[in-house]
Amino acid sequence: MNTKELAKSAKEASLALLGADSELKNTALEAIRKNIEEKKEEIFEANKQDLQEAKSLVDSGEISSSTYARLKLDENKMRDMLKGIQDVISLEDPANKVLWTKELDEGLILKKITCPIGVIGVIFEARPDVISQIASLAIKSGNAVILKGGKESNHTNAKIAQIINDALSSVQNFPKNVINLVFSRDDIKELLNLDEYIDLIIPRGSNKLVKYIQENTKIPVLGHASGICHIFVDESAKPNLVNDVCVDAKIQYPSACNAVETILVHKNYKELDSLKEALVNSGVKIVENPDTFSKEYGDKIVSLKVVDSLEEAILHINKFGSGHTDSILTEDKNNAEKFMNYVDSAGVYHNTSTRFSDGFRYGFGAEVGISTNKTHARGPVGLDGLTIYKYKLFGQYQTVAPYANGEKTFKHKFV
């Protein structure tokens, strides 16, 4: 079927999922987990083919070395994929939860209740393990999804999607066309125009990709264009622990969006040379006078700047940061509180690595992405971020006229 027909079928699937109970959704997820585990060698073989073909894309400059690194699917990532699905199974169903109940008047009850968003389009680069994460979160929250991965991971994406849909086809009463995959750039262009069927777009990839999507669709977009994360080393921070945290935040996964890109150091911090040495010994290149502080390196490179005060650090982060994740290392609780209150980011940390900004590490089971938006969902987006809400009003044949002419008044009482 063409892209429009696929989107229409996904919309129909999302409507069929509205009444699905937790047992059906969990049964579907367990079937997926089991099938992926049984056929993981097929996935590894497909991934090897992608890796071989992607080498020429790196050589030609079509993809970066950091994108190539994210493409690899190994036993560790497979373990996390399976664990992520299992974690989602164990989480509470986010749909059909009563957020509050209000008595408007006697016999007139209003309830605010969570519900799925509908059809979610996810466009991502590399990282084929994203498919199982998003599929499990979409199913548990009651959404249908259309996935578009980068061409560098086509073989792996197709194999994982096939294994997922094979599993779903074995689950009685589970709707068809809940998990969908498209492949071409033309598919992206068409998806961005299908606002009658698609309710939300989530891009996961480069700054260029996200900006293109934001500028070429009427569909709401949830995501982040860049991950320019900071660590501020205050003068009271513990030197040996500072070194450990800064090194972890840069080298544990340099191409991740939550890796630190700029380290700000208070002018009175006495162990700056020790910090530099620790970074260099870990293979990190330090740039002390960058042309811009708005660059996401995605590599073992970090900008470093000495600042006069906590206030200067906060101003710097709010000016050059991307609103993703920023951390302060300090023993001064007042400074920590001020930093965490005044830094305008989705994640603000005290004495921890920025790498903790992750749906799996937050206990969300997995994530569809990390959002720097100010509306709907922010930070790692898990199950709750894939729901919205509706108002259900239960009455006894009341009409508005008596309230409009003053014969009756509302109670507006929470119950």
Image: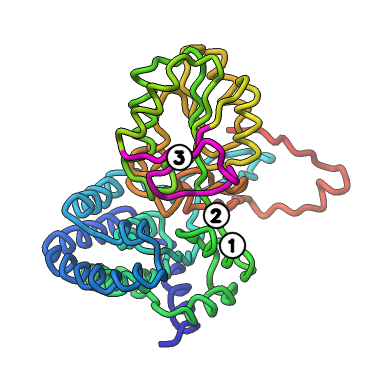
* Residue hosting label 3: 302
Residue at position x 36%, y 27% in the image? 277
Q: CA distance from mark 3 to mark 1?
A: 24 Å
Amino acid at dot 1: Lys
Residue type at mark 3 is Val
Earlier residue among tags 2 and 3: 2
Question: Looking at the picture, how far across and down is residue 258, in whole percent?
Answer: 43, 43
Q: Is residue 365 above or below residue 72?
A: above
The percent position of residue 169, horizontal first and vertical second, equals: 24, 73
- Give the amino acid at mark 2: Ala
- First reached walking from the N terminus: tag 3 or tag 1: 1
Q: Is residue 295 magenta?
A: yes
Q: Quadrant of residue 43?
A: bottom left
The reply to whether dot 2 and dot 1 touch (C-beta < 8 Å) is: yes
Residue range highlighted in magenta: 283-304
Q: Disc 2 or 1, which lies upstream in sequence? A: 1
C-alpha separation, residue under disc 2 versus residue under disc 1: 7 Å
Residue 173 visible: no
Crowd tier of the residue under label 2, counting other residues whose Cα lies within 10 Å: few below 14, some 14–19, many 20 or above: many
Residue 298 forms part of the magenta stretch? yes
Q: Which mark is residue 211?
A: 1
- Crowding at dot 1, Cα within 10 Å, few <14 / some 14-19 / many 20+, comes out as some
> In terms of secondary structure, where does tag 3 sit?
strand
Horizontal placement of 158 versus 339: left or right? Answer: left
